């Protein structure tokens, strides 16, 4: 009962949709960014064909191991060669299944104003997902906890440049694994009104997530299944394997009409060949194997192909991110996604341990690789540290500055070349001896002409020093606390909230999901 009362009190004021957090900073309005640039394509047509043929050889001659009996039975029914847990399939079958997948689709959350288009030229950004540890300037590095989880969900809702709530932004290990998914998804669905992700980690977690999303949306079972309302992301177990729970979850969601992203985690030099072409080829084969399974079971199911191909540090064996190799692998996978007609997912990642210069240049490399590759959905776009082992609110704030800059970069007004933009009359008016600060052309545009930062400090050194010499992570920390102080959750109908509470309480009483603990 105490948990239920706590959840009820945690909600926003339904009579006031104004988000008080808007006073903490001035940010860009909600928008769906459209990437106007032609993708960077490092490979010529012969390179694309070579990787495709390599992936087809892997699927036909080497095979992919599926640690899921249902998947093995489905592949056997489809006429694939199944030996033990290894599945082999030929190119004609693969391409027939891939052609069933839609090139574009939408996901509609409980707030229909937040509907997300997947594919085409759209690029969407999500929060950091799945780190077991939390870091901020007060605590340092600590294990994930529920209050920290809630703070990240609030940041996810607050920032308009964050379009979806991915996995747990930090793993709250102070909540038992049997019921953790219930508490975490409840917070996601009540503290945000954006598209939500669910982990494919067992039947109970997937079925609970679908039911909670349905309830939060005020939907009938038929309305929920009629179009995508949520999504999952599954990873292969590189090299050449798909495990039981993720394939099970992918099949459940696909059969219910929900979206599935298939993202192999291939680290060149460790779980994949040391060459980027070899690593990308392996990644494509692993991803297509799962997509083929999904399309055979649920033709036309919404799917995306994901890339998480990077390299290891050959001195330590640790994963490296935001490297030149990572950038090229992302661009190469973008070429392959377009070859197969599939939407693309990539990530905003780094290997840095704190929100310092290394963190920002590696993350910026990752984010710009997403832009350059034609990525449609960017995981971990804000808050990621230590190769995914740490989530940081300061890093989240700093990353959102970069995301806003990328969104501004994509706005057509920046490169518009109409008569008023060329401004010949103004150039003549000012002439060789004047300046443009005071002319009417500038006065009419000065508030919107350029990007305005919320955490960057553009003053000179002396002004910065007189004002306390506050470094960027410290400024981000202040912004974080200001947002938390003013945050207000989006409205939710009281009856829907009661139904959601009742479902969570019932499932907790039933024991939640089985665990090994």
Image: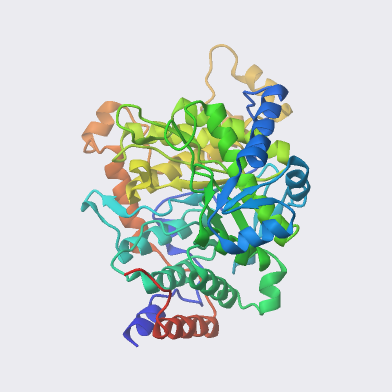
Horizontally, residue 516 falls left or right of residue 137, namely right
Residues 49 and 45: in front is 49
Name the residue rendered at 64%, 26% in the picture: 41
Residues 438 and 226: in front is 226
Q: Position of residue 503 (x, y in %)?
A: 49, 83
Q: Position of residue 74 (x, y in %)?
A: 68, 60
Colouring method of the image: rainbow
Name the residue rendered at 66%, 78% in the picture: 221
Horizontally, residue 232 falls left or right of residue 486, namely right
Quadrant position of the C terminus in the picture: bottom left
The furthest residue to the top: 432
Residue 302 appears in view: no
Horizontally, residue 6 falls left or right of residue 227, namely left
Residues 78 and 308: in front is 78
The answer to whether 366 is drawn above or below residue 303 in the figure is above
Residues 438 and 22: in front is 22
Q: What is the tally of numbered marks visible in this picture?
A: 0
The answer to whether 303 is drawn above or below residue 58 in the figure is below
Quadrant position of the N terminus in the picture: bottom left
Name the residue rendered at 25%, 38% in the picture: 470
The answer to whether 506 is drawn above or below residue 214 in the figure is below
Q: Position of residue 423 (x, y in %)?
A: 67, 24
The answer to whether 117 is drawn above or below residue 415 in the figure is below
Q: Position of residue 515 (x, y in %)?
A: 38, 70
The furthest residue to the bottom: 1
């Amino acid at each position: 009962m105490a948990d239920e009362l706590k959840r009820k009190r945690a909600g926003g004021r339904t009579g006031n949709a104004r988000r008080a957090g808007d006073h903490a900073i001035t940010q860009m309005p909600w928008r769906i960014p459209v990437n106007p640039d032609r993708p960077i394509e490092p490979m010529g047509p012969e390179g694309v064909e070579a990787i495709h043929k390599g992936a087809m050889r892997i699927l036909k001659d080497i095979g992919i191991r599926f640690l899921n009996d249902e998947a093995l039975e489905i592949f056997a029914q489809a006429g694939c060669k199944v030996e033990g847990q290894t599945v082999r399939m030929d190119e004609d079958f693969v391409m027939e299944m891939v052609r069933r997948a839609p090139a574009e689709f939408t996901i509609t959350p409980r707030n229909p104003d937040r509907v997300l288009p997947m594919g085409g030229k759209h690029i969407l950004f999500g929060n950091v997902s799945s780190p077991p540890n939390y870091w901020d300037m007060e605590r340092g590095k600590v294990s994930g906890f529920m209050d920290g989880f809630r703070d990240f969900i609030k940041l996810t809702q607050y920032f308009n440049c964050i379009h979806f709530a991915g996995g747990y932004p930090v793993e709250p290990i102070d909540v038992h694994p049997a019921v953790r998914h219930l508490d975490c998804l409840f917070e996601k669905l009540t503290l945000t009104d954006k598209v939500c992700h669910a982990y494919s980690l067992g039947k109970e977690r997937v079925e609970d997530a679908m039911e909670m999303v349905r309830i939060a949306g005020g939907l009938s079972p038929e309305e929920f299944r009629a179009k995508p309302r949520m999504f999952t992301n599954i990873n292969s177990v590189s090299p050449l394997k798909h495990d039981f729970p993720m394939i099970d979850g992918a099949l459940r969601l696909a059969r219910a009409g929900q979206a599935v992203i298939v993202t192999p985690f291939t680290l060149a030099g460790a779980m994949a060949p040391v060459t980027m072409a070899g690593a990308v080829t392996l990644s494509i084969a692993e991803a297509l194997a799962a997509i083929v399974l999904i399309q055979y079971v649920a033709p036309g199911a919404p799917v995306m192909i994901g890339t998480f191909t990077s390299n290891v540090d050959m001195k330590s064996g640790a994963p490296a991110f935001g490297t030149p190799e990572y950038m090229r692998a992302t661009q190469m996978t973008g070429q392959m996604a377009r070859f197969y007609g599939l939407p693309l997912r990539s990530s905003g990642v780094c290997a840095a341990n704190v929100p310092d210069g290394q963190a920002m240049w590696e993350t910026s490399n990752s984010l710009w690789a997403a832009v350059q590759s034609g990525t449609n959905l960017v995981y971990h776009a804000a808050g990621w540290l230590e190769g995914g082992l740490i989530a940081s609110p300061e890093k989240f704030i700093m990353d959102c500055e970069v995301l806003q800059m990328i969104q501004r970069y994509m706005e057509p007004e920046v490169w518009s070349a109409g008569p008023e933009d060329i401004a010949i009359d103004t150039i003549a008016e000012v002439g060789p001896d004047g300046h443009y600060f005071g002319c009417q052309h500038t006065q009419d545009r000065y508030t919107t002409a350029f990007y305005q930062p919320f955490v960057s400090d553009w003053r000179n050194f002396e002004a910065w020093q007189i004002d306390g010499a506050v470094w960027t992570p410290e400024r981000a920390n202040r912004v974080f606390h200001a947002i938390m102080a003013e945050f207000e959750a989006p409205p939710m109908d009281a009856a829907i909230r009661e139904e959601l509470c009742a479902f969570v309480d019932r499932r907790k009483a039933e024991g939640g999901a089985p665990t090994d603990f």
